[in-house]
Image (cartoon, rainbow, N blue to C red):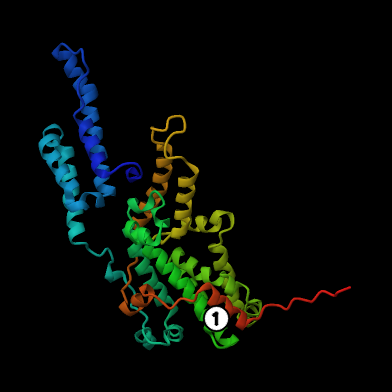
Amino acid sequence: MTHHSFTTSEDLMAVLLKRYEVSPPLGIKDEATFQSWVESKLMPVKSQVLQVLSFWVTYQFADFVANDKALLVKLNEFLNVKALPDFPVKAAHIQDLLSARLASFDHPDSPINLKLAPKPILTKSVSKLTGPDKELQLLSVDETELARQWALVESSLFRQIGPKELINQIWGRTHESSKTKAPTISKMIEITSHMTYLVVAMILRAPNEKQRHAVVKYWVRVGQACAKLNNFNALTAIFGGFTSLPIKRLDRLWKTFKSAHPKSNELLGQLSELVSASGQYAAYRRALKACQPPCLPYLGVYITDLTLIEEGNQDYLPQNGSLINFEKRRKVATVIDEILARQQQCIYHLIAVPALQDFLTSSHERLSEVEAFKLSVAVEPLPEEDDEDDD
């Protein structure tokens, strides 16, 4: 899964096929010794090569359909000419895997079972989310339905993340580079960012304290619905807005909200603890481990874990700069394994509401940091500094 960090798929395939054709050692002079070598060395090596190819097709099929399916052609040729005569069952199994993955790639079926889906909760405001007052209209959209559509959008993206996007920190490179090399991660980060800024903008643009209370209460309820759906990624986006500097500094808002809405404030505290970064997201990690699928993990924690591995371990062994540090790759693979396992179970049986999904995935007018802080100060001015007496 991590070979893209140190080689290309084409070179890896060439090495595997060369390994399959391992030559007998010099000095074998009789048939009995040769047959013993074939049984004890050659056939086990060939079998291991087929195991690697089977794993590769199963977990990283995208490699085989890239570059006009050149790798797929090469693998099929190898299976027909070399592997089938040696291992008919194993080779046929890989061919079946290829056929199944190719069919699902060309004609992907939705994993969602609509028979299990609850009826969407629609309000008149859903059709008005494209207008100039869309932020105001959003407050009339059912919180549960917004959370459902958010889960559908993000789970679809989460399931599409391939191992190739998770190596060498390509998600953190220049904006255009990350869009090209890690398009799915880039899109998920973009949606999270949009929604965080939306929470900030809606609070700051509210015309009075009562309306600001209404906005905070709405997003707390959306957060509660996200938590019930085990959508930790969306929940973290909401609290990213609550904990941003322009919002966090509004002491009067939070004090009056606590007294005016004690139940919502208590829920706010519980949800905040759930996605707190304290102890390297200890509470979140416990909740993730205990939750029953479907579950949408907070992508940022995986990115942080992978970043620490990438930056804390050298690509090559220090004692020999030409030897690949496979311990580092094993650590990366452990994280990727967990992501792949989560992807298989991240299926929400819900009915899509296109208008809500369009709202979630479209760009919203974003306040700059300067604009947001100016609005924040307009809502609650900075405390006046006492003038020092000149003695």
Quadrant of residue 115 in the image? bottom left
> In the displayed structure, does residue 69 sit left or right of residue 171?
left
The residue at the point 22 percent across, 52 percent down is 66
Q: How many marks?
A: 1
> In the displayed structure, does residue 267 sit left or right of residue 90?
right
Helix, strand or loop at mark 1: helix
| Residue type of the residue flagged with mark 1 | Leu
Pick the quarter of the image with the C terminus.
bottom right
Q: Is residue 258 above or below residue 329?
A: below
Quadrant of residue 45 in the image? top left
Residue 347 seen in the current view? no
Provide residue 33's location: percent of width, then percent of height: 19, 14
Q: Is residue 177 above or below residue 87?
A: below
Residue 113 seen in the current view? yes
The residue at the point 40 percent across, 67 percent down is 190
Q: Residues within 10 Å of mark 1 (few under 14, many from 20)?
A: many
Provide residue 297's location: percent of width, then percent of height: 43, 59
Residue at the spot of label 1: 204
Provide residue 180's location: percent of width, then percent of height: 32, 59
The residue at the point 54 percent across, 57 percent down is 281
Provide residue 358's location: percent of width, then percent of height: 34, 76
